[in-house]
Image (tube, rainbow, N blue to C red):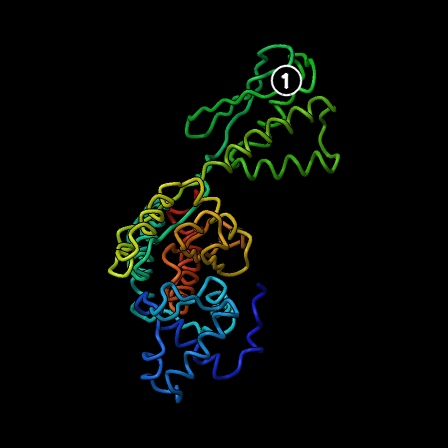
Amino acid sequence: MPTPPLSELTTRARDIFRLVVEGYIADGQPVGSKTLAGRGGVNLSPASIRSVLQELQDAGLLAAPHTSAGRMPTDVGLRLFVDGIMQAAEPSAAERMQIERGLASGGTIEAAIAAASSALSELSAAAGVVMVPRREPRLQQISFVPLGPLRALAVLVAEDGGVENRVIDLPGALDPATLEQAGNYLTARLSGRTLAEAIHVVRSEIDGGRSALDAASADLVQRGLAVWSVDAAARPVLVVRGQANLLDEAALQDIERVRQLLDELENAEAIAGVLDAARLAQATRIFIGSENRLFSLSGSAVIASPWRDMDGRVVGVVGVIGPTRLNYARVVPMVDFTAQSLGKLIGQDGFSRI
């Protein structure tokens, strides 16, 4: 069923819908007509309110979990509320101070992201999450060692002495001189750079026809870079804090949903995939219930924002995972502020190696 636009709701329906959503967010319980009739601003009888609630339910915005248990917003209803009705509240001075104090307490990026996820968890009463790509070392040398007619070993040596190897397929039978030329070319452009920086430089030269490599060597270089870039992107660092916050009184009444969510939070690779969907966003993204496949079974929500370095490049993603009754108006600006605070750390002493 298509979601009705906000403009199609009458003022009365819109007011009642807002009160139902706000009541559900406050205590996690369905809201009944008698409760609404007792609140200020609703000058209707319980019978009239029930009629409006039924209209909102027929439109797919509300649901009745039990026959006489009142109404609660559906995922579609929450989306309409977040996009069209909610008024975000800026983090308070105390909340901003708690986030900044936590980030300033550590001297490493690992400590900073742990502090960021913990602060978000405490302030949102949900699970705080931060994801960053695994820190790339500065490179010193790369070489190719033949393993057979159509395979070679790419050997990468970092400035800190670390060595990693990858087996790559060759485009054809290549002589040792070609392997050596490709290794020398990469080493000359790798020294002192991260892999991401080296990939950008090398590919620009090859694509622009500015390299001195022959076709076979250029293809070998491209294959080697492809192996390393895919590997680096597949190994994010993910920090999750505050799972215990999900076990509040309202959640314990639906313990199966909570158990499902806790199981989902154990799947770090899948969570990283969810957060990665927010990396290219210009602002904070919100995934509600079934909008995200991973958390659809537990009926949970994800609020995530990318954080950037001083050059505007996305470094990672910070966010909150919790029940769909998250206080979106409060948590969304809080996540955004944490992302901005993390971004300010990039380039400062102790954080330049991200």
- Residue furthest to the left in view is 249
At label 1, counting other C-alpha atoms closer than 10 Å, the crowd grade (few under 14, some 14-19, many 20 or more) is many
Q: Quadrant of the N terminus?
A: bottom right
Query: Is residue 114 shown left or right of residue 136?
Result: left
Residue 341, placed above or below residue 266: below
In front here: 288 or 275? Answer: 288
Measured as percent of width and height from the top left, residue 236 is found at 44, 40
Measured as percent of width and height from the top left, residue 99 is found at 33, 60
Element type at mark 1: helix
Measured as percent of width and height from the top left, residue 351 is found at 40, 47
Q: Name the residue: 45% across, 64% down.
A: 74
Residue 257, placed above or below residue 218: below
- Residue furthest to the bottom in view is 43
In front here: 238 or 79? Answer: 79
Measured as percent of width and height from the top left, residue 65 is found at 38, 63
Q: Name the residue: 44% across, 60% down.
A: 340
Query: Is residue 126 shown left or right of residue 151?
Result: left
Q: Quadrant of the C terminus?
A: top left
Q: Amino acid at mark 1?
A: Leu
Query: Is residue 124 shown left or right of residue 12?
Result: left
In front here: 294 or 164? Answer: 294
Q: Which residue is mark 1?
A: 179
The part of the image, by quadrant, that contains residue 344 is: bottom left
Number of callouts: 1
- Residue furthest to the top in view is 148
In front here: 311 or 124? Answer: 124
